[in-house]
Image (cartoon, helix red, strand yellow):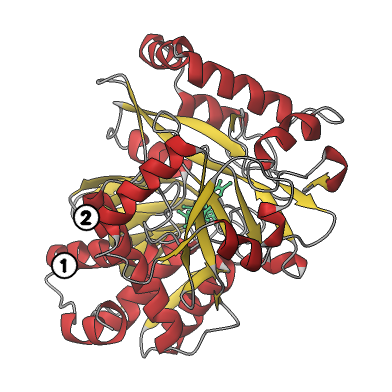
């Protein structure tokens, strides 16, 4: 059955990315008719759920794999989420001012962090430099039993911790409060998108809808939608799972991140006081290739095989990754982390970098926690792409948003909203947008 009404925009997915776009279109554009499809019964059931990710608002300050240029962009983008939370009164319900730090262990890391401090402190004037004494006072567990030298750059009084599911719900509720015709279709899975002259037909399991523009914010599935329409064939998905461990007792008050290995930018262990567990300390994530598109849900084998697109080009990328000794060791260790009984014993070696006295008996595998990162493989250039990926074809946009996609969700939404307005000949209210969430 085709529903004849023509929507201006159809959004697929109500994770933080799709919800942010719904809010941005509803509040800052004069687009009137929007329809959103979400295959589950409420927003943020997959990666944007608070148990799936680390709940960190990534500002580029403690992510030591970012160049200054990249950090500037990430800060500009993530500040929008912090501004949104403050401006609309969602502090202490959605976003939280908790301390965080980046910890350098050993002379080599300290030298790198000192260098970074010089280069980055203009961009992050709030950095607090901490040595042994300050750390012992602030986070005693970091110093207990420690022999190596340490240094940290701390961040105090900023919004650092976000429940991205709550944020998604805030976005949807605020969008629905606008004087617009918005239809929310939960429990409605989109099967395919077809181009039909000057519009798109969005086919769901039960029905079919028409829209002038369409945006897929459906994680790895966004690429499948694009490929069914003949786009993005040069890309494939490498699904990377991430798991966590809880400590039996709360050991830290701050988020504590460690220095990144440049070869493994998503891999450095960190410890996060967890919103869902009364601020108990959660360690992780691990990172390992897992043949699934959705963690803790059914396998979706057909979609998985299509998304991974295992052929000569993808295998060459896997081969290149495995040829590197550091990456090989990392993959093997992370595989062991997942094995019941021995996993804790392997993971604790990494966790000790933050808390030297930790033993495997202090850790419990965080059952039900963790998500999937849809990392994109560029088959043409034989590379594993980091960060977000986007395909734009006329009125259709396809977003894949691995980390730090939740932190940058409002910026991705801004870009897409402007693009859609240009396509439809509608207006984007830049002044209001800047006043409320860009400039603070
Ligand atoms: C272990 C881990 C830790 C992370 N930590 C952080 C962090 O600390 N900070 C940060 O900023 N980012 C973090 N990330 C990344 C972050 O979680 C993601 O970037 C973000 O959640 C992506 O949002 P999304 O809306 O694109 O995807 P999702 O939240 O996965 O939402 C996609 C939505 O699309 C829906 N959908 C899919 N297919 C269909 C279909 N056919 N029809 C209808 N609906 C469909 C799904 O049901 C889902 O609701 C982490 C990720 C992982 C895996």
Q: In this view, does 92 lie to the left or right of 252?
A: left
Residue 70 position in % (x across, y down): 26, 50
Which of the 4 quarters of the picture holds residue 269? top right
The residue identified by callout 1 is: 424
Residue at 17% in and 80% down: 430
Residue 381, given in percent of the width and then of the height, sits at: 25, 21
Residue in the picture at 67% in, 25% down: 335
In the image: residue 232, left or right of residue 259: left
Q: Which mark is residue 395?
A: 2
Compare residues 39 and 264 and report the one nearer the observer: 264
Q: In this view, does 116 lie above or below 278?
A: above
- Judging depth in this view, the residue of 343 and 9 nearest the camera is 343
Mark 1 lies on a secondary structure that is helix
Q: In which quarter of the image is the C terminus?
A: bottom left
Q: Earlier in the sequence, mark 1 or mark 2?
A: 2
Between 217 and 92, the one nearer to me in the picture: 92
Rounded to the nearest angstrom, the CA distance separating label 1 from label 2 is 8 Å
* Residue located 78% across and 62% down the image: 250
Could you tell me if the residues under marks 1 and 2 are in contact, i.e. CB atoms within 8 Å?
yes
- Say if residue 189 shows up in the picture: no
Residue 422, image x, y percentages: 13, 66
Residue 200 rendering spot, x and y as whole percentages: 29, 53
């Amino acid at each position: 059955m085709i529903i004849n009404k023509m929507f201006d925009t159809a959004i697929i997915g109500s994770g933080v990315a799709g919800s942010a776009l719904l809010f941005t279109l509803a509040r800052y554009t004069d687009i009137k008719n929007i329809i959103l499809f979400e295959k589950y019964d409420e927003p943020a059931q997959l990666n944007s759920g608070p148990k799936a990710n680390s709940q960190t608002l990534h500002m580029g300050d403690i992510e030591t794999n970012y160049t200054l240029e990249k950090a500037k962009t990430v800060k500009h983008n993530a500040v929008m989420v912090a501004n949104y939370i403050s401006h609309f009164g969602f502090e202490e319900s959605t976003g939280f001012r908790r301390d965080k730090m980046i910890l350098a262990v050993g002379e080599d890391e300290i030298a790198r962090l000192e260098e970074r401090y010089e280069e980055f402190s203009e961009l992050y004037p709030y950095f607090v430099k901490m040595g042994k004494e300050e750390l012992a006072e602030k986070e005693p567990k970091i110093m207990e039993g420690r022999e190596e030298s340490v240094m940290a750059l701390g961040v105090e009084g900023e919004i650092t911790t976000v429940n991205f599911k709550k944020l998604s719900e805030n976005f949807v509720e605020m969008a629905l409060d606008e004087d617009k015709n918005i239809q929310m279709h939960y429990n409605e899975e989109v099967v395919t998108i077809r181009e039909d002259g000057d519009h798109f037909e969005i086919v769901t399991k039960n029905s079919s809808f028409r829209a002038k523009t369409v945006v897929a914010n459906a994680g790895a599935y966004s690429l499948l939608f694009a490929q069914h329409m003949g786009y993005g064939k040069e890309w494939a998905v490498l699904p990377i799972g991430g798991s966590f461990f809880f400590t039996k007792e709360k050991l830290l008050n701050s988020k504590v991140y460690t220095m990144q290995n440049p070869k493994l930018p998503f891999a450095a262990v960190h410890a996060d006081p967890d919103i869902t567990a009364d601020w108990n300390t959660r360690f992780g994530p691990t990172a390992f290739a897992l043949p699934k598109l959705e963690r803790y849900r059914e396998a979706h084998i057909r979609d998985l095989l299509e998304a991974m697109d295992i052929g000569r080009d993808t295998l060459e990328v896997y081969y290149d990754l495995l040829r590197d000794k550091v990456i090989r060791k990392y993959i093997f260790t992370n595989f062991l982390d997942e094995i019941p009984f021995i996993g804790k014993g392997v993971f604790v070696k990494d966790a000790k970098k933050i808390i030297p006295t930790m033993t495997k008996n202090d850790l419990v595998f965080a059952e039900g926690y963790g998500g999937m990162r849809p990392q994109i493989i560029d088959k043409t250039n034989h590379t594993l792409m980091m960060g977000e990926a986007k395909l734009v074809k006329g009125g259709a946009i396809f977003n894949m948003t691995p980390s730090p996609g939740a932190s940058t969700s409002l910026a991705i939404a801004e870009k897409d909203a402007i693009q859609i307005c240009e396509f439809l000949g509608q207006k984007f209210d830049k002044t209001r947008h800047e006043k409320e969430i860009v400039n603070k």
